[in-house]
Image (spheres, coloured by chain):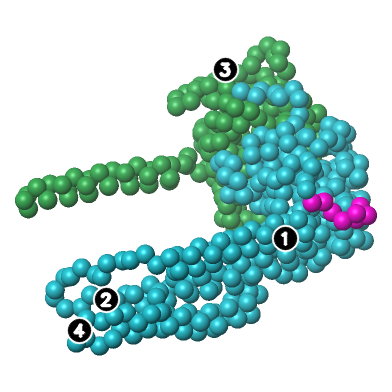
Chain colours: A cyan, B green
Amino acid sequence: MSAVRASAAGAPPEPRHGIRIAVLWAILTIAGVPLVVFVLGPHLPPFDGNSVQANDQHDVNVTLLALAVPVAALIWVYFGYAVIVFRQRGQDIVDGPPIIGTPRLQLTWLIVTAVMVLGLATYGTADLLGRAAGAGGGEGPNPLVEAPAGAHPLQVQVIGQQWLWTFRYPSYGGVETPELVLPRNRWVEFHVTSLDVVHSFWAVELGIKADAVPGSDNVAFGDPIKVEKFQVRCSELCGLWHGHMNTRGQVMTQTGFASWIARQQVKYAGVTKYLPPYNHIYYPKPLRRAG
Amino acid sequence: VLRRALLVGATCVVLVGLVLAYLFAFLTAAPAALSATVQNGSAHLTLETVPTYGHSPDPDWVSYLALDSSGHWRHTTIYKVPAHTLVTVTVYQFDTATGLRNPFLAKVMGTQGDLATMNGKAMSVLNPDDASHTFTIPDLGVSVPLPGISSTAKNPCGSSPCPLSNDHNTITFSFMAPGPGTYRWQCFVPCGAGFILGNGGPMQTIGWMDGLIEVT
């Protein structure tokens, strides 16, 4: 690409298109990467600081976007350059020069793209097994990555049904509540399931998501580190009121959580006695009037 | 050529218009809203749940009905209530029990004192197996289980509207309407008989076991 192309007799020599494109690409990349990292990055969800998992996802999002800048810049620069410089001018429509295979270019392209894809796959896999700390549920009851040894996570069962989320705390008498409250700085082990169709539990600001599948126990982990409210949504199209299947969650201090859960145990004592014994698969039997 | 082009163009316009009209009608189809009656600063809604609607388009479907100010039962589940007002709801419940899939919803929640009355007696929680339907507004935290009539009732209702001479339970509860907005409500008992998991048909259709509370 960078070689000076032989020009027709009498015509001026072709400029070094490859060098021009490389220079433009380098300028855009040098300008774009810091913009993405330092200007756009802080505004990318999930916002930094809410949980260990949200922090990791935020860093991954910024890293991947920064890595995408040079790729996008090359495509845009080449496209723009070709449209402007290689434009057919004049009235006559003539065929372009024949395309001849260039093994060096093709090999370079193959190596660069292979390195990029394999590098990203390695980065993603290492992150999933390491820093992501089991936030991305979907591995069923025996996830590859669990909370750190000795963390003693708080178990919370997340129950989806058309169209409501409820949450059960087995270590507090199996009390079930309509809101999700979590203690700060304590690992949480979510056991996500459904009573009817497939839903998807998504604690948005905490960066935790796991499918809720009837008859399945889908485990995900979280470690909230900031006291704040967060949204819980369903991210799997699940029927008429799917768009309304939202609720609020809250991260409290450990003292606040202890006080809150004690109040819930009193408030819902009357109905707790009717709940089935705690089980990771929350699927009542017999299935009454099941069509 | 011009004539043919005009003909093709006009046909396309008509076809696109028909598709758009169908989509518009489909997306905007909803039962008419029914306003709560307001007396002495509080609003009242009178509803009934019937085991089978008894009329087209789906005579076999279970449904809610609402009483309008002229004393006629209307087939609608969209109710208008004034903001920041105490809303008292009376439900005449004519259906038999199906049972709750999630027993947690057997508790009366979000009403005045977290209580309802069933045939004049206070009720805070129901045996989940005895629930026939619920009236639940999730965004307001309001949920009331509605006990079913006996499966051996001697005088059950056939089709709507059900007269009070048929076997029924009367459930009453009150809740405070919030600020203006639209809030969905639904039944949480899987009462859509004949559908997968009991959650299809009337459970997925506004006007039957789902509706809206329009707070104005």
The alpha-carbon separation of the residues under discs 1 and 4 comes to 58 Å
Q: Nearer the viewer, residue B178 or A180?
A: A180
Q: Position of residue A239 (x, y in %)?
A: 57, 40
Q: On the picture, is B53 further left or further right than A43?
A: left
Is residue B36 rendered magenta in the image? no
Q: Which mark is residue A127?
A: 1
* Sequence-first tag of 1 and 4: 4
Q: Which mark is residue A9?
A: 4
Is B104 situated above or below B129?
Answer: below
Label 3 vs label 1, nearer the camera: 1
Answer yes or no: is residue A229 visible. no
- What stretch of residues is rendered in magenta? A145-152
Q: Residue at x 43, y 65 (%)?
A: A103
Q: Amino acid at mark 2?
A: Arg
Mark 4 and mark 3, same subunit?
A: no
Q: Nearer the viewer, residue B199 or B148?
A: B199
Q: Which mark is residue A87?
A: 2
The alpha-carbon separation of the residues under discs 3 and 1 comes to 62 Å
Q: Chain of mark 3?
A: B
Quick one: label 2, few (<14), some, or many (20+) residues within 10 Å?
few
Q: Residue at x 69, y 42 (%)?
A: A212
Q: Position of residue B82 (x, y in %)?
A: 60, 53
**Magenta part, dominant SS:** loop
Q: Position of residue B137 (x, y in %)?
A: 66, 45
